[in-house]
Image (tube, grey):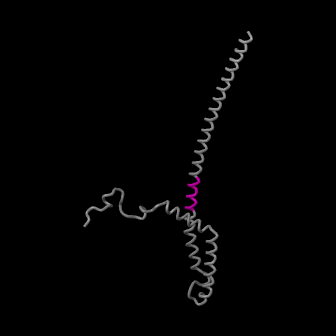
Amino acid sequence: MKIRDDAVTTPGKVGRSLVSTYDRDTVGRWSEAIARGMGGGKFLIIQTIVVIVWIALNAVAGSKGLWDEYPFILLNLLFSIEAAYAAPLILLAQHRQDARDRALAERDREVNHRILSDSEFLTRELAAIRLRLDDLVSISETKSISIDLDRAD
């Protein structure tokens, strides 16, 4: 008999649960893959073929009363289940895409701010160099004028 259980000795761990093994990122990637698949033409073609085959088989078997008869309630139930799962998965995929877009926009803002500050710094440096060159030119002009005046004497 085990006297001490992990659930007792580990703080915050009451027992095993589905929530402790739930990985939001994995579920998000899974939902994006499903949403991407459901949004494609291949899925629509396959679903259309399945519906046509379903109706054709039920038209033959339904007349004998063996399967899903004319109002196709079972097919309607399957579409309802598909819609009930598809809508939240598509919303989850959209939320993840929104989060990625926000992160990219924030990174772009940071890069733009860094580029702006770098260009402002370079502008100030160029202005300082230009002022120094102007001072150098005026000093050399002053010296050349004074040299010319000395020669004139």
Residue 8: in magenta span = no
* Position of residue 17 in the picture relative to residue 129 (left or right): left
Q: How many marks?
A: 0
Give how far across and how far down residue 106 sits, in percent: 57, 48
116, 6: nearer the viewer: 116
Q: In terms of depth relative to the viewer, which is nearer, 6 or 68?
A: 6
- In the picture as drawn, the residue positioned furthest to the front comes out as 151
| Depicted 23 relative to depicted 44: above or below | above
Q: Nearer the viewer, residue 73 or 51?
A: 51
Task: Tell me residue 119's x, y (percent).
Answer: 63, 38
Find residue 6 and report its image quarter.
bottom left
**Stretch of the chain drawn in magenta:** 91-101
At x 61%, y 89%, the residue is: 63
User: Which x, y percent locates residue 9?
Assistant: 30, 58
* Left or right: residue 103 compared with residue 150: left
**Which residue is the extreme one toward the right?**
152
Quadrant placement of the N terminus: bottom left
In which image quadrant can residue 3 be found? bottom left
Q: Is residue 95 magenta?
A: yes
Using the image, determine if residue 80 lies above or below residue 57. above
| Majority secondary structure of magenta residues | helix
Seen as rendered, the residue at the extreme top is: 153
Q: From what the image shows, is residue 74 above or below residue 24?
A: below
Residue 96, percent across and down? 55, 58
Q: Which is nearer the eye, 50 or 7?
A: 50
Quarter of the image for the C terminus: give it: top right
Residue at left offset 63%, top offset 78%? 49
